[in-house]
């Protein structure tokens, strides 16, 4: 799996703005995968650590609906920390990228759109297994 840090991108979610507030829309054309699952994290303690795994085939869009958190991504060669704090900017994570999420703000809500239903066999939860998967 040759995916790299540069394949992870911020997706700008289109918004409709008027005096009544903002309306953000994610449609088929906004993201490069078909949404098969939606889940969200909330009531997350500020010292929580989440993620700590990669996926073999799953694509995800991570959106900080409220508040902020940091996503550390690794491709086996390079790593990068991306702070997510705007509800109209989502992080597109492609398969074969290790992620760790921490530094959750109080009251934060993290929405995740995913390209398939939950499947534990798609997870790589051990970093050495991840490096083998990446053929590193
Ligand atoms: P996990 O994906 O490891 O959470 P995170 O990456 O946020 O730390 O999932 C935590 C637990 O929840 C794990 O036991 C699997 C379960 N789970 C489901 O049952 N369905 C789901 O859609 C997800 C994402 C997790």
Image: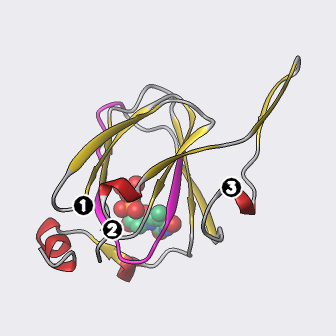
Q: How far, Cα to Cα, is label 3 from label 2? A: 21 Å
Q: Residue furthest bottom?
A: 121
Left or right? Give the position of 16 relative to 133. Answer: right
Q: Residues within 10 Å of mark 1 (few under 14, many from 20)?
A: many
Rendered image quadrant of residue 99? bottom left
Spot occupied by residue 61 in the image (x, y as percentages of width and height): 53, 55
The secondary element bearing badge 1 is classed as: loop
* Numbered circle sitting on residue 48: none
Q: Is residue 45 above or below residue 62?
A: above
Which quadrant is home to the N terminus?
A: bottom left
Would you name the residue on which mark 2 appears? 3
Q: How far, Cα to Cα, is label 2 from label 1? A: 7 Å
Left or right? Give the position of 13 relative to 83. Answer: right
Residue 69 belongs to magenta span = no
Would you name the residue on which mark 3 appears? 30
Would you name the residue on which mark 1 appears? 75
Foreground of the two, 126 or 48: 126
């Amino acid at each position: 799996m040759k995916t790299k840090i540069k394949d992870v991108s911020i997706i700008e979610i289109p918004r409709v703005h008027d005096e009544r507030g903002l309306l953000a829309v994610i449609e088929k054309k906004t993201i490069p995968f078909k949404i098969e699952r939606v889940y969200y994290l909330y009531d997350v303690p500020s010292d929580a650590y989440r993620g700590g795994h990669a996926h073999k085939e799953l694509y995800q869009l991570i959106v900080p609906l409220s508040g902020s958190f940091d996503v550390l991504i690794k491709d086996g060669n390079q790593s990068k920390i991306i702070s997510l704090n705007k509800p109209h900017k989502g992080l597109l994570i492609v398969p074969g990228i290790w992620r760790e999420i921490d530094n959750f703000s109080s009251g934060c809500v993290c929405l995740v759109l995913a390209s398939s239903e939950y499947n534990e066999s798609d997870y790589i939860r051990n970093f050495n297994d991840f490096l083998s998967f990446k053929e590193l």
